[in-house]
Image (spheres, rainbow, N blue to C red):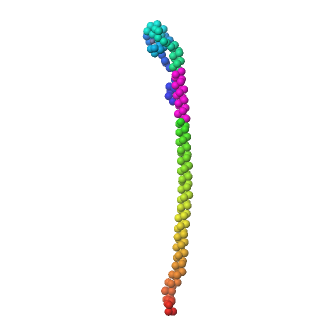
Amino acid sequence: MAANIYVNEIELEPEECILHKGAKVNAICESCDEPVCLRCLLGSHNGHPIVDIQEARERVREDLLGHRRALRKEIKRMEANLRDYTEKEAENDRECGLALNKIRKRGKTLQTQLTKLLQDLENEVKDRQEQNQRLISEHKDPLESQIKNGHIKTERD
Ligand SMILES: [Zn+2]
Ligand SMILES: [Zn+2]
């Protein structure tokens, strides 16, 4: 926050007239927008509209206070926006984190299911291979032993 928001004292005008040494400035000439002393008022600023120096200071002070209020309001608005974005940021992290966890969990389940499915299929094929082997052996083994032992049966036997 800029320090000028908290400025309380401002040197508005010189206390002594720049034209008349020792003469106190007690008004602002509105036509010339210059600080003036009594001698100025009787001289070059004769007849010009003037504002009391205290009144002029009060006006500037009120202006400054107005600016300060506006600035504070703006800062509050910006801080609220920042909180908003910070919340959105946290929400984004939270939601995406949840989504990632879901995906990973689902991935693990699918991997387990796929591994089991492949294992089942493999077992099925192995079982079939064994069954077929048994059936084949039932026919093949007697033939082999018959040939080995010379017990060949023919149509004519
Ligand atoms: Zn003067
Ligand atoms: Zn003047």
Residue 146 appears in the rendering: yes
> What's the residue at 52%, 22% (across, down)?
63
> What's the residue at 53%, 36% (across, down)?
82
Main SS category, magenta section = helix
> What's the residue at 55%, 35% (across, down)?
80
Please provide percent x and percent y for residue 13. Answer: 48, 16
- Observer-nearest of 49 and 97: 49
65 relative to 101, above or below: above
128 relative to 145, above or below: above
Please provide percent x and percent y for residue 128. Answer: 53, 72
Q: Quadrant of residue 120?
A: bottom right
Please provide percent x and percent y for residue 10. Answer: 50, 20
94 relative to 43, above or below: below
Residue 23 appears in the rendering: no
- Observer-nearest of 131 and 27: 27
Q: Which residues are magenta?
A: 62-80
- Observer-nearest of 84 and 21: 84
> Farthest residue toward the bottom?
156
> What's the residue at 48%, 12% (across, down)?
49
Count the numbered circles shown: 0
Please provide percent x and percent y for residue 15. Answer: 48, 13
Q: Is residue 97 magenta?
A: no
